[in-house]
Amino acid sequence: MYSFEYQKAGSVADAAKAATGEAKLVAGGMTLIPTLKLRLAQPSKLVDLGGLKDLVGIKAEGGGVTIGAMTTHAAVASSAEVKKAIPALAALAAGIGDPAVRNRGTIGGSVANNDPAADYPAACVALGATIVTSKRKITADDFFKGLFETALEEGEVITAISFPAPEKAAYMKFRNPASRYALVGVFVAKTKGGVRVAVTGAGEGGVFRKKSFEEALGKSFAGSALDGVKVDAKGLNSDIHASADYRAHLIKVMAKRAVDAAK
Amino acid sequence: MPEGTGIGASVRRREDARFLTGSGTYTDDINRPGQTYAVMVRSPHAHAKIKKIDKSKASAMPGFVACFTGDDMKVGGLPCGWLVKNQDGTPMVEPPHPVLAQEYVRHVGDIVAVVIGETKQQARDAADALVVDYGVMPAAVSLKEAVKPGAPQVWEQAKGNICYDWGLGDKAAVDAAFAKAAKVAKLDLVNNRLIPNAMEPRAAIGEFDRATGDYTLYTTSQNPHVIRLLMGAFVLSIPESKLRIVAPDVGGGFGSKIFHYAEEAIVTWATGQIKKPIKWTAERSESFMSDAHGRDHVSHAEMAMDKDGKFLALRVETLANMGAYLSTFSTCVPTYLYATLLAGVYTTPAIFCNVKAVFTNTVPVDAYRGAGRPEATFMLERLVDVCAKEMKMDPAEIRRKNFIQPSQFPYQTPVALQYDTGNYDATLDMALKMIDYKGFPARKEAAAKKGKLRGIGISCYIEACGIAPSAVVGSLGARAGLYECANVRVHPTGSVSIFTGSHAHGQGHETTFAQVVSEKLGVPLEQIDIVHGDTGKIAFGMGTYGSRSIAVGGAALVKALDKVIAKGKKIAAHLMEASEKDVEFKDGKFQVAGTDKAKTFGEVALTAYVPHNYPITELEPGLEEQAFYDPLNFTYPSGCYIAEVEIDKDTGTIEVARFVASDDFGKIINPMIVEGQVHGGIAQGLGQAMLETCVYDKDGQLLTGSYNDYAMPRADDFPSFEVQHSDKPTPCTHNPLGVKGCGEAGAIGSPPALINAICNALGVGHMDMPATNEKIWRAANAHAARAAE
Ligand SMILES: Cc1cc2nc3c(=O)[nH]c(=O)nc-3n(C[C@H](O)[C@H](O)[C@H](O)COP(=O)(O)OP(=O)(O)OC[C@H]3O[C@@H](n4cnc5c(N)ncnc54)[C@H](O)[C@@H]3O)c2cc1C
């Protein structure tokens, strides 16, 4: 770790103002702190969102839920509101990392980080979530820009994420045997606006929507509807853990299982 | 003996309270006054010439204390402990192993310089500022590539990157047997490279005493005396009398902390230069690229059989990766700890094994839980399954047909070892019963109904432990003796301190060794202290590896205890005015046979130190005895493991449905601790079989350099293993406890059981480890395609 200045933010505005230039926001620190320990980043200052009470908590609204950016994965996993409105989202949160990670890591940090193998981005995209920031509201489709890249601008703080409730949804995660992040994760949601399918872990550019699945499932929301749909391995990751072919195959298997498990 | 504390009792591990409450003292917990911090500057390249090292920026950094490179530190090289000879009788190629790189770096992680700072952060900052100019060279990385003509040379003197070309067995007899064989089974296999991953990363603190000129090294070692010998005599030329090595609590080793590492020599040498204590603690990513790795073989094996499936001859060719330098025990692992085990539990009359050890631009490879024996067992137990398939025989039946029978012991194998005792049918029968072998077809059918593929796999292992008879290993090239030493100090009030050369780093010696003492002396456990891990306290020792602690260290302890009892009898006889030969020692009492005259152990101890009424002209006061024990033979634990798996064809995921173990460890001191050792060993073996593998890219970059990419097994990957000890155990015939050792068995026996089960489920001939989900998925698809034809 290199040495840095530490500032505890007093308000979101305070944080937004401080988090410019070489300064960085810190939420749960589950991603950022290891990066610092490995000396892969050298921020001049860490601006801690930890004390901001208004960023913590889950509100049921209009059938859906709005989750404060500093809400931990453990809180989402055990929330009665989330379990009621979107059980698939609670289950997803329960499957992130290990207990220590779930007790520290936050939804805001996960979404801001946009790790291509993280779970939440798939939920945001498939459920058509809205990312609420200190400046504006961004749809999930516009928010995730590529590997570790988002639409966030300098000094922009995520404050909450709003998830409309789907009719049915499920997330199926095939874990990387080493990291246990998603090797392939597929979130399927049957929403008022149609079926949305988002895939994480597999794409070279991070989370993506699987339009051919959405079309097939739009016609018939059953796993078997995907039988005839081909998944091209082009654009998928190939690494020491899985070839692109295997990932392509898993996308379909996980999608079918998600559809069949959706509730 | 106090109730339930002697041999055979499942006493709870006394050391665990300390470990589980964070009150242990590990090397990194130790802080010496005025301590500075060392950071190793490591090569980012697999092979390069060091063109220039510029210290100017680094030395201007705040808190900078010192920086040393290979040019500064001209000391001896790290020694290799075992000379292996080529088939033509010439010695192996033994290149230098500099402590700090000299002119070239030969693997990613090779140490180029040490930077010392007042704080750890300052040392890191200064290390970041050290400028090293490298001329990158092509690297030889994988075994198969390194032996190809024209491959980059790791060492000029090792042509074709060959360290040695060694053979064991009677080649002519093997060729003759193959010529008349009815059937031959063949197998190509890889034993995947592993990264050890002890829970505690390595650490070392060097401290120089200006008053006495003494050096102390605190280090994460399984064998402090070995480190003192190697570092003192070969590297730094410090006499033993001036060098103390302390290996305090050590958080796991699995072999990786046997070896003498450069960092130990660096902090010890450098503290002499700067006259301040220096601490180095590995970061986890440093461990990945600097702890000696394990396994890494590529082999071809063939078994010749008669028409009934009786083994006639075995022929094996193996390439074994040494990495870039010869680590302490590296050369004996794929030879004397590997080829000697190729008879397994079978009567195969002729065996020949050729091993070529190969240099590559990778981290040195050395002993890792099992060391050579897992490689032999995986090879043999896989090949036996291929034989069964070839003969259309049941895998259990072909094994039974070829077992060495109880009546054949002592049994001389064609590969140098003489097994003293064993009963292989007993453990096979037990395991078959535990798993309900007969019920397997029904379970397979039930699984098929759920769309799953179920398979079963057997492995009958044997290992050679209790390392080792010094004269035997000496004749085979070992450069050390492999006895053990124990000292029993009885204190005036009858409490006892045991000083043992067997180091404990998770095995539970503080409990088991105390049980042996409690059994022999009748002293309660609370009054027995087991001291280990400090050359300043312990007379001598060869340390812990090769499942040798109880078999060799325990035997030394028994010898020393017997000496204490013998002296105690003399004292007691004097006190009771009896003849020494009439005095018996039983249940903590010296008793005149046939009378009720007795003296307790405590009374005798007190008399030894308060010798008012004492045979002073014949006997010295005090009650302290020491013994060395050099084993007469190896010990031969054996057993049978059976795995049952269920495979999801759609994803290639595998569920280990059950795993049963039946082991024959001879006499058992603490059944619970032994069971624990087997559980841990199996987890490690299944980790190798299912998940773990070290991957380098073609340039020699380590792709599995962290837990993000190196798949360690977790508890939820496995069921709870069903572990039982043989109901017909065969105690070792040549050590006083009848014990065989149990530390490595699980890791040795389990990989082939799992792979055999997977191959059985998929109907394939072989699958290399780790059996990843993708490999299984591909094989299952091919299986489905075959079935459709
Ligand atoms: C062992 C381990 C296993 C894990 N497994 C998984 C897994 O299976 N699936 C998974 O999805 N994730 C996993 N993670 C990641 C985990 O979910 C992290 O918690 C998450 O990615 C980051 O959240 P955080 O609160 O810790 O953020 P931090 O580490 O504090 O920050 C991460 C980044 O986000 C920025 N940031 C944080 N909060 C905000 C905000 N409100 N507005 C704008 N920017 C912000 C920070 O500046 C930083 O760049 C794992 C992590 C670990 C250590």
Image (tube, coloured by chain):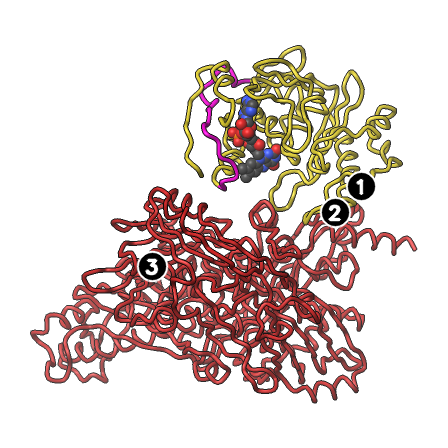
- Residue B291, position as x, y percentages in the image: 49, 58
Whole-number angstrom distance, CA of label 3 to CA of label 1: 55 Å
Under circle 3, the secondary element is helix
Sequence-wise first label, 2 or 1: 1
In the image, is residue B16 above or below residue B760? above
Give the labeled residue for mark 2. Answer: A243
Q: Chain of mark 2?
A: A
Q: Chain of mark 1?
A: A
The type of residue carrying mark 1 is: Ala
Q: Which residues are magenta?
A: A38-57
Give the labeled residue for mark 3. Answer: B270
Discs 3 and 1 carry the same chain letter: no
Mark drawn on residue A51? none
The residue depicted at 47 percent of the width and 83 percent of the height is B472
Q: Chain of mark 3?
A: B
The type of residue carrying mark 3 is: Ala
Q: Nearer the viewer, mark 2 or mark 3?
A: 3
Q: Quadrant of residue A207?
A: top right
Give the labeled residue for mark 1. Answer: A233
